[in-house]
């Protein structure tokens, strides 16, 4: 494929923007570069939440600021036009007299939504939009899903045996609640990498009681996701990993007895007599959780599949065979990507 000069530079913006995934949420992880006479003189991506935006970091990295009035700024997402935790990036661009700005896509955030582009034009900038828009949308999928559909970007994940089971029969397991591994360490490390990229992670009561998972990042460096647990009757012991306060969890329950709540965690009431996926999405939206990684169990996964509330599914198949046990969910589409991780097979599905 042949790319124009602007498209090549936008691809570079997307590449460096990937460095911020998992640290900037609920803000998007934006990438920006400054180009002068065909040479990149500055690069930047969004700092962890509360820090500087990509444009600030890119412009700040330019050693010779005298070149800025003769340069082009490339950025994956429209520069902001409002005061948040940081000043408007559009104002910064105008203050440095950058004459040309190339933008991947318009920001759907209600406080921006074209106002940044208009401010730049009103200030005399030559503005080009929609450059590599499809690729920019793919990169900003979490942020866009949250602001366009008012729900998190949802990724389903499970591991299954070669004959399609997620777990063995209960009598095959240890009496102590702990994970039963189907996949190899390379696959588990990949899962921890994925966890570091997402803002929230969801499991159901039965999974917690059976596995006592930590749901954190141990085999990869990075920030762990916010645990969300469906626990209708508050059956999960407070000393279990997800409730022990290491990372404050959001417990979705219908039990209103606050004496049973633990102070380290947040409790949100939902109606378990009605479908849960949409209610969980609403709670995520209220909590500004832009992406949700769903690790189980089977009932929880199937509820999102049946509600058609999912965006990706990442399914590992190990080489074990249980012959009986807890059946894994099935998907109505073929995988888009298939990869081998030693003796495991990873299939990735896009809805």
Image (tube, grey):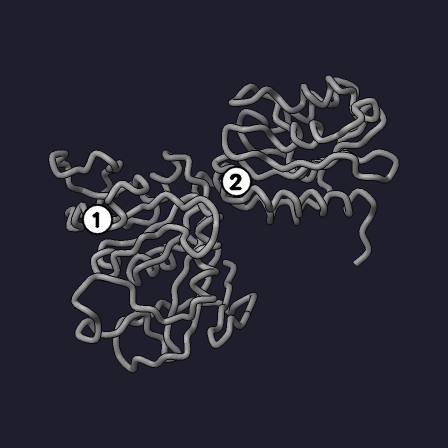
Answer above or below: position of 37 versus 120.
below
How far apart are labels 1 and 2 at the CA level? 28 Å
Residue ID at (19%, 71%): 170
User: Which label sits on residue 143?
Assistant: 2
Residue ID at (34%, 59%): 301
Question: Total number of numbered labels?
Answer: 2
Give residue 335's position: percent from left, percent from top.
52, 68
Quarter location, residue 257? top left
Q: Quadrant of the N terminus?
A: bottom right
- Give the secondary structure at mark 1: loop
Residue ID at (44%, 59%): 191
Quarter location, residue 167? bottom left
Give whichever of discs 1 and 2 has the lower sequence position: 2
Answer above or below: position of 162 versus 77.
below
Asked if residue 180 can be seen in this view, the reply is yes
- Which residue carries the number 1 mark? 231
Residue ID at (36%, 67%): 329
Give residue 59's position: percent from left, percent from top.
71, 28
Asked if residue 122 can be seen in this view, the reply is no
């Amino acid at each position: 494929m042949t790319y124009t000069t602007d498209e090549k530079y936008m691809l570079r913006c997307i590449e460096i923007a990937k460095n911020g995934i998992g640290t900037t949420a609920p803000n998007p992880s934006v990438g920006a570069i400054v180009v002068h006479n065909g040479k990149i003189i500055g690069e930047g991506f969004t700092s962890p939440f509360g820090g500087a935006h990509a444009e600030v970091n890119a412009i700040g990295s330019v050693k010779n600021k005298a070149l800025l009035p003769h340069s082009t700024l490339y950025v994956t997402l429209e520069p902001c036009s409002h005061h948040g935790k940081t000043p408007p990036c559009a104002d910064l661009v105008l203050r440095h007299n950058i004459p040309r700005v190339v933008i991947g896509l318009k920001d759907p955030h209600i406080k921006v939504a074209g106002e940044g582009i208009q401010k730049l034009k009103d200030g005399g900038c030559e503005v080009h939009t929609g450059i590599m828009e499809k690729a920019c949308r793919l990169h900003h999928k979490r942020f866009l899903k949250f602001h366009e559909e008012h729900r998190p970007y949802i990724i389903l994940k499970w591991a299954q045996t070669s004959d399609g089971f997620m777990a063995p029969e209960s009598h095959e397991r240890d009496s102590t609640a702990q994970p039963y591994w189907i996949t190899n360490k390379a696959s588990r490390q990949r899962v921890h990498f994925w966890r570091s990229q997402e803002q929230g992670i969801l499991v159901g009561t039965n999974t917690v009681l059976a596995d006592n998972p930590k749901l954190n990042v141990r085999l990869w460096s990075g920030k762990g996701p916010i645990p969300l647990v469906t626990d209708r009757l508050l059956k999960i012991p407070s000393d279990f990993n997800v409730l022990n306060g290491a990372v404050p969890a959001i417990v979705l329950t219908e039990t209103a007895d606050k004496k049973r709540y633990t102070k380290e965690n947040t409790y949100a009431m939902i109606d378990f007599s009605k479908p849960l996926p949409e209610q969980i999405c609403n709670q995520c939206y209220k909590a500004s959780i832009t992406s949700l990684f769903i690790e189980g169990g089977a009932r929880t996964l199937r509820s999102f599949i049946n509600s058609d509330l999912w965006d990706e599914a990442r399914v590992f198949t190990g080489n074990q065979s249980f012959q009986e046990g807890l059946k894994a969910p099935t998907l109505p589409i073929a995988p888009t990507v298939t990869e081998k991780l030693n003796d495991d097979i990873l299939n990735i599905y896009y809805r």
